[in-house]
Image (tube, helix red, strand yellow):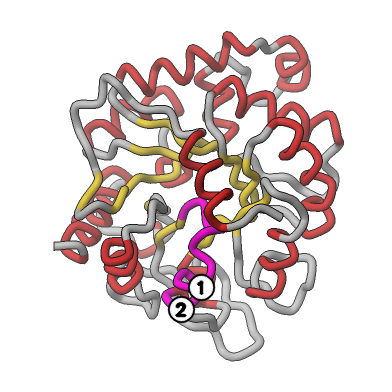
Amino acid sequence: MKTRREFGKVLLAGIPAVASCTVSSRVGGVEIGLITYSLRSMPAASMIPAIAKIGLSEVELMSGDAEALAGAPHSFGLSMWRSSATPKDFHLVRKKFTDAGIDLRILCFNMPVSISDAEIDYAFRMAQALQVKVISSSSTVAVARRVAPFAAKYKIIWAAHGHDNVKDPEQFATPEVFAKVVAMGPYMGINLDIGHFTAAGFDAVSYIKENHAHITHLHLKDRKKSPQGQMTPILDNNFPWGEGDTPICDVLQLLKREHYNIPANVEFEYAARAKGDAIAEVERCFDYAKKCLA
């Protein structure tokens, strides 16, 4: 397993500079971005202008959005399209973000238990063509074991995205499970969702302090702590920032104080309590983050 310093060098070396970027959402030294899942209510083609309007300069791109921007069909014929897709298709997707001054850092490619080795390889080839060095993924421990050789082959970090199912040892929910994933290989990391981590009953601030070298990026949302040993539905237990138990400001202040190079990506998931559309709510979250870092 790589040392913390070596892991950090791999991560930093893989983040291309955005030469044309004129807008920066780095606040107090902390990079605030978003995952395009936050804009799931709009077509992929509208996402880049929306991100630019909000003023964010770093993005984690969902695989379905990447494929849509590359010209894939909505559903029917996707498998056939994937078999004929070329690196150039995804080079053009990256160029769209670069031309808009947005740093495409991370690909989110979720991997169910049923995923084939061919699909895993496709995910890494897509990431390679998009010129990202991190794939985030909601998945399981069993899939992570299968992924580790691919991550080492392509030299692309695969980051386990946490949720809050502490009862299932296959789920990425506890510090112990994250430790298992990191130990699987030199390119295995952690995408810490501080909202889910809080709902699961853990302290995000202390965990980041102890494990920051293996954390590729954060997802920011505000959830309340669930009753011990229980899960609460994500859609019900998800609140406008400042109304839950998640220590968003404390986490952002930690990143600022310790100069951790960990992007913090907005994940707008409290639609049931939203006052505006996705763009307005992401702007609201961004404003909250800026106040935390003032």
Q: Label 2: which residue?
A: 206
Specify the farthest residue to the left: 294
Residue 100: quadrant of the picture: top left
Could you tell whether 51 is left or right of 205 in the image? left
Residue 106, horizontal then vertical, whole percent = 51, 38
Residue 72, horizontal then vertical, whole percent = 61, 17
Residue 43: quadrant of the picture: top left
Comparing labels 1 and 2, the label whose residue is closer to the camera: 1
Q: Label 1: which residue?
A: 210
Could you tell whether 59 is left or right of 178 in the image? left
Secondary structure under badge 1?
Answer: helix
Location of residue 131 with respect to 89 vertically, above or below: below
Is-magenta flag for residue 215?
A: yes
Residue at image point 70% right, 75% down? 176
Q: Quadrant of the N terminus?
A: bottom right
Q: Nearer the viewer, residue 171 or 79?
A: 171
Is-magenta flag for residue 203?
A: no
**Amino acid type indicated by mark 2:** Ser
Residue 111, horizontal then vertical, whole percent = 73, 45
